[in-house]
Image (cartoon, rainbow, N blue to C red):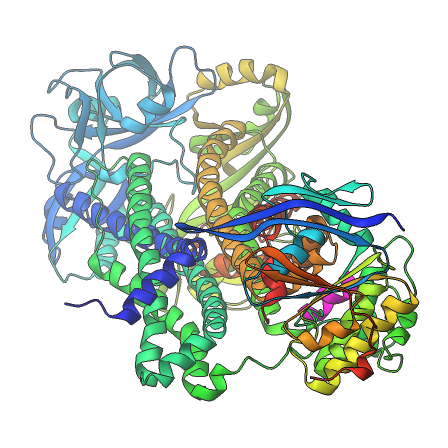
Amino acid sequence: MKFSSLNRKLLRDLWSLKTQVVSIALVIACGIGGFIGSLSTYSSLVWSRAHYYDTARFAHVFATAKRAPGSLAEKIRALPGVAEVETRVVRDAQLSIPGVVPPMIARLIGVDFARPPGMNRLTLKQGRWPAPGAKGEVVVNQRFLEARDLKLGQHMNVLLNGKLERLTLVGTVLSPEYIYATRGGGMPDDEWFAVLWTDARALAAAFNMEGAFNSVLLRLQRGTSTEATVEALDALLEPYGGFGAVGREEQVSDKILTQEISQQRVFGTVLPAIFLAVAAFILNVVLHRQVNAQRGEIAALKALGYEDRAIAWHYLKFASAIVLLGVAIGVWLGHWMGNAMTGLYTDFFHFPEFHYRLEPWLVLAGAGAALAAAFGGALAAIRGVVRLRAAEALRAPAPAAFRPLLLERLGYAGALTPAQRMIMRNLERKPLRAAITVAGIAGSVAILIAGTFWGDAIEWFMDVQFNQVQRAQVNIGFAEAVPREALWSLERLPGVKQAEVARAIPVRLRAGHRSYRTALNGLADGAELQRILDADLRQAQPAPGGVLLTTRLAERLDVAPGDMLFAELLEGKRVKAALRVTGTVRELAGMNAWMRLDDLNRLAREGPVASSAGLLVDRASEGALLERLKQMPAAAVVIVNRTLVDTFRETSAKNVLFFTAILSAFAATIAVGVVYNSARIQLAERAWELASLRVLGFTRGEVSVLLLGELALEIAAAIPLGFAAGYGLAALLLALMPHEMIEFPLIIAPRTYLYSGAVAAAAGVVSALIVRNRIDNLDMVGVLKTRE
Amino acid sequence: MTEPLFQARALTKVYRMGESEVHALRGVDLEIRAGEFIVLLGPSGSGKSTLLNILGGLDTPTTGDVRFLEHQLTGASEAELTRFRREHVGFVFQFYNLIPSLTTRENVELVTDIAAAPMRADEALAWVGLAERLDHFPSQLSGGEQQRVAIARAIAKRPQVLLCDEPTGALDYETGKLVLEVIAKINAELGTTAMVITHNAAISGMADRVLRLGNGKIVGEERPARKLTPAEISW
């Protein structure tokens, strides 16, 4: 096939504009890369999770009770739609490892190692399985081993039913149930929470659970309603102290995993959309200028008999070439990023297998969106070409008409130098183009802010949560409810400055057809170590005789202050009662239901008892206190808040850093793309004028100021605009993010603004330096002989 | 006899145009005295513009030597050449090269702002007869008016030399004459040395000296017996 002359011209045009072509292609590549990277990570994770759940035969329904007889399993199996039932013993206990002072929690799960479990199958990562019947041999979740840097063969002690037992670590495993291991909060807790699988009979014996179970897993037949099964199971377990069954979507690990994965989808759609919009902007401007510069050639083509359609197609091909280059780089970038991020997450979640999948539809959708955006921009310019009559196009364009500045028309002209006037009038003459440049730079600033403010929000959240809401440094959970008088003995422990008790009772709250499993929290009047604060840090108190709900929980249950709730307490006398909602509070974390402590004790028909305590401690004697607590059998769970904060900071810092790095690179690419292209277009249009000035005796520096001054003004205008847009975009992202357990506040620290502004400014400087080189080489001789 | 303003010795200029070499100047010797009105004549490609550009500090010779008073232009740095143009040379171009975003007055001020001892912008514009069009933008002026603004801009810094490359090339007859009158008047009354490139032999009647260039060399030099005023010449 003969390569047509028009196509040859296309290739040469592309080559002569190569730097601009590449910079625009890179902006498109960032958009496509972000889109493909995030969404392929999302689909890979969804697929990996489904695949893992499938092969590990992850349960559909989970329930715990105090102590149910083994024979109940048969009744559960007989429930409609239930395919399989597995019962087991699961207990939390204090864990200590030589050399670690703060207490840790071990969740002990009984397994018959002789027979592979039918559900929640473990994957052995290291070492071996405990020998069937061997006492004291355990396998632990891989994440704990890594977080604690333990070796196989490590000995550790657990407090089993008041007796200290010595356990030996013989292997590590992965479990679909503890992809995200946590004691219940929304935060990963790998350093302080170990999941240990041990011989079922030995564990049952230690807790007097022979022939009984306290945890049950179900797999359902296809099409069976989870809600109906949960309800039926609750009814069966109720006499045995059932704590309320949950389906997969309320299972803690799955819930957090789902939340993490969904974030990818938000990131993968919102930010790349902005990248693509900016790329379309730039493409539009470049094509406009390209078309204008080629008026003569277009006229000649028309005079030679080329049809409008052929000429328009020529320029669309020009746009397509840039887009396709961008798409090619973008697909490569997205594939690389998706692979890296899926790898990071696979590692983070410890999925047993790594599966990265790049679905073809993602590439097609990304390329399609980029082409559509580019064609939209290009068509406007092309319409201008096609309208030109040949003769008209052959004539030079009319001289650029300028007029005095608005400022001057208003009578404030005196202060400006001619150079400043040139800059200002140029801006005023092409306000749309200036606006596009400003919008592009502002967009990159906004992306950077929206991508990096999470660190600020998390920092603020942590400060509020651990310094103002939960002010206790050490929290104790008792194995059984204790009389409130226990407070007195706590206050006498070494280093305790202040102590408070509280009560929490697992509950299922119902309103109409909606229900939610949480806890009723009883708070002593005037409690200081645990406070209820709304997002604006205003303190709230539960009103006498009613319940105060976190706003998110009220919304979930669709209730408002004054409405009635139906509460089924899942502990003790398992009271069922109606409760009045007396208020809602926009707490940052949790799905809480607060009551006055006295009200809660009365509701539960129990005496003045408590189930947890918070301590304010003298840091110097913390070690001694923790040693004492380890020896108190009643203190089943001891949590040192500081350790939680540290772990959380470490994990989040890594994620924040990763996103900051990627987004900074993207934002800088956009800013450079916008500024550089804008400068190049300006330079091309004004080369004649600037060269004339050089002839008149203006120095390179003075001439550069004229061109770059305009860009500097545009950047200066764009940065504050970008701040505002970034704030808005951050708010949008927060609104779109799934946030059942935690509502991140819209907190953006000054350093985030500063950093984002600095990146845009730096991109401006880099672009300016590249363009400056061209200004230095303006053709002064040529300009004398040519018309503009 | 006054000290020569320009002294050029054995100037050559070779441009590389891809594979081939173009010899624009092939050994030009020239002296120009202060206050002279010189017309450069010659066909396209004879080297007129190259010579003018080298004298004006826009270009440098391949070999040879140029001096402007005590300034050695050969071998001067880009910054030194820029300062030379800024302080001593006024340029007038065929296509006026006005800044479209500045008014008449501001185009002149552009130069007076960076010159050492300039005249006032309105004074310079009065010289070219444009005192009433101070606040017009180039797009609001005719071609002749634009060229007069360019001349006002060139003389406002009180340059020692005015270099004009085809100043009437883009103008009609009447307007062209008007522009030539202005250049002649400045040469006569301000004593500014003027060097005008043209294709138009009729203009040479205005000159003190006419240099004919051909094939990169000065092939002829005439001193008209009587210097004509622009009004007296026609073409």
Near-viewer residue (A253 or A288): A288
The residue drawn where x is 21% and y is 26% is: A204
**Residue B109 location, x and y as percent?**
84, 65
In the displayed structure, does residue A527 sit left or right of residue A318?
right
Q: Main secondary structure of the magenta part?
A: helix
Q: On the image, which quarter does residue A420 sit in? A: bottom right
Relative vertical location of residue A403 with respect to residue A208 in this rendering, above or below: below
Near-viewer residue (A324 or A652): A324
The residue drawn where x is 33% and y is 18% is: A158
For the C terminus of chain A, which image quadrant?
bottom right
Near-viewer residue (B141 or A642): B141
Relative vertical location of residue A220 with respect to residue A345 in this rendering, above or below: below
**Residue A62 location, x and y as percent?**
24, 46
Viewer can see residue A548: no
**Residue A130 location, x and y as percent?**
15, 19
**Residue A731 location, x and y as percent?**
54, 59
The residue drawn where x is 57% and y is 46% is: A766
For the N terminus of chain A, which image quadrant?
bottom left
For the view shown, which residue lies furthest in the front direction?
Answer: B225
Relative vertical location of residue A178 with respect to residue A413 in this rendering, above or below: above
Bounds of the magenta segment: A418-426
